[in-house]
Image (tube, helix red, strand yellow):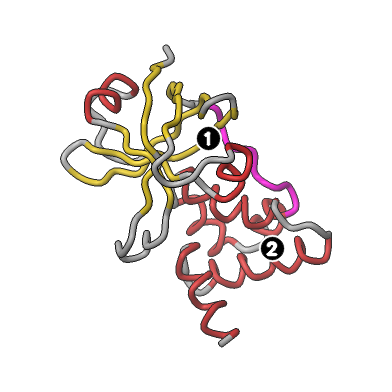
Amino acid sequence: MAIKFEAPILKFAEKGEKTGWTYIEIPIEIADALNPHVKKSYRVKGKLNNYLVKQVALIPMGRGLFIFPINAEMRKHLGKNKGDILSVELSLDTSEIKLNEDFLICLQDEPHAYKLFTSFSQSHQKYFNNYIETAKTDATRAKRIAQSLQALLVGMNFAEMIRAQKTLKS
């Protein structure tokens, strides 16, 4: 069942790791209608205006409130900015995440990395997968698979891997 509502686009000023994020708020009543009594992250699908979205994780912010992060790709397609109103249509997304086959093969060769990876929630696994899948060349994709495996082997989650890479570059 899809739930329809309108929401303004918001942007965090200073909010720890969420600083600068663009998002819409998902009020308690709507979150409860989508997935009753669930207070942890879950995935939704639907439309922002006429832009289709799927497998987007709603992020809990406490007291039953969730946010729906709007990434750069979504903003580009929507042509909307902070303060603009979106027509939102959402429903629970229970579809399975299709992981990159090359990454899965490499994970199976590294039991420690595989065990850690499979202990993560599907939405956290999706961060790794999207990082790999958004590579524009095969060489970059291979490099990202190797980086992801190396991070998992030393016990890092996705955010830790990205922070470590930024530290190395500076």
At mark 1, the secondary structure is: strand
In percent of width and height, residue 16 lies at 31, 66
In percent of width and height, residue 62 lies at 20, 45
30 above or below 166?
above
Callout 2 environment at 10 Å: few (<14), some (14 to 19), or many (20+)?
many
Q: Is residue 88 left or right of residue 36?
A: right
What amino acid is at disc 1? Gln
6 above or below 72?
above
Residue that appears at 58% across and 40% down = 79
Q: Is residue 37 left or right of residue 59?
A: left
69 above or below 19?
above
At mark 2, the secondary structure is: helix
Q: Residue furthest left?
A: 63
Secondary structure mostly taken by the magenta-highlighted segment of the chain:
loop
Residue 31 image-quadrant placement: top left
Q: Residue furthest top?
A: 1
Front position in the image: 15 or 153: 15
Front position in the image: 159 or 74: 74
In percent of width and height, residue 140 lies at 77, 65
The span shown in magenta is 95-102
In percent of width and height, residue 43 lies at 44, 34
The residue that label 2 is drawn on is: 145
Residue 136 image-quadrant placement: bottom right
131 above or below 54?
below
Q: Is residue 149 left or right of residue 33?
A: right
Q: Is residue 81 left or right of residue 63?
A: right
